[in-house]
Amino acid sequence: MKELVWRQVLSVEVDEIDDDHKKLVKLFNMLNHAVTEGEDPDYLAAVLEELINCTVWHFSHEERLMVKYGYDGYAEHKEEHRELIESAKGLQQKVVAAGKQVVDDDIVFLERWLTEHILTTDMRLGAYLAQAM
């Protein structure tokens, strides 16, 4: 599985959001490497937990900025955040509660989940915030 590399194309042009995204990419890569290397399931579960917790915090950060700067797309963006966290927690449930392994398909899902959100919804938010801040 290839590593997800932070590139300028992922920048939303708001440093504090980009910094959060860079951390999420780093955590994603840690999980990706752990799966590839066949790490202990408890370690995989811990990395996945950290990725989800960091994502929840990041989403709260974005939502605070949306409220502060009067972003019109707030309700839809927040709903997308809720759906993304729900799907990630579903994966976590499968891994932790059901005792399943994180597999390559899960990594592909998480990569798509992260990059598509940044490249679509967060780009619109970043363009708005770059003007409003």
Image (tube, rainbow, N blue to C red):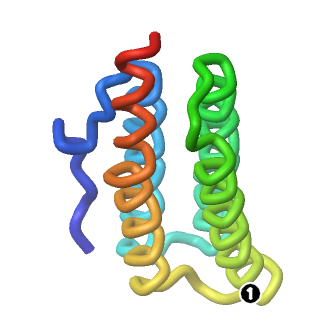
Coordinates of residue 21 in the picture (x, y in percent)? 42, 39
Residue sitting farthest toward the front: 72
Quarter of the figure with the N terminus: bottom left
Residue at point 22%, 49% (across, down): 5
The foreground one among 22 and 26 is 22
Residue at point 39%, 47% (across, down): 25
The foreground one among 77 and 43 is 77
Count of marks, rendered view = 1
Coordinates of residue 119 in the picture (x, y in percent)? 32, 52
User: Which image quarter: residue 89?
Assistant: bottom right
Residue sitting farthest toward the top: 133
The relative height of residue 107 versus residue 70 in the rendered view (above or below) is below
The relative height of residue 23 versus residue 120 in the rendered view (above or below) is above
The foreground one among 3 and 63 is 63
Residue sitting farthest toward the right: 97
User: Which image quarter: residue 56?
Assistant: top right
Residue at point 71%, 84% (across, down): 94
Coordinates of residue 14 in the picture (x, y in percent)? 37, 22
Q: Which residue is mark 1?
A: 99
Residue at point 64%, 68% (across, down): 88
Q: Which kind of residue does numbered mark 1 sit on?
A: Gly
The foreground one among 74 and 36 is 74
Mark 1: give few (<14), some (14-19) or many (20+) Cα within 10 Å. Answer: few
Query: Is residue 113 left or right of 101 when viewed as pictured?
Result: left
User: Which image quarter: residue 132?
Assistant: top left
Query: Is residue 35 left or right of 75 when viewed as pictured?
Result: left
In what element is the residue under mark 1? loop
Coordinates of residue 28 in the picture (x, y in percent)? 44, 56
Query: Is residue 39 left or right of 66 when viewed as pictured?
Result: left
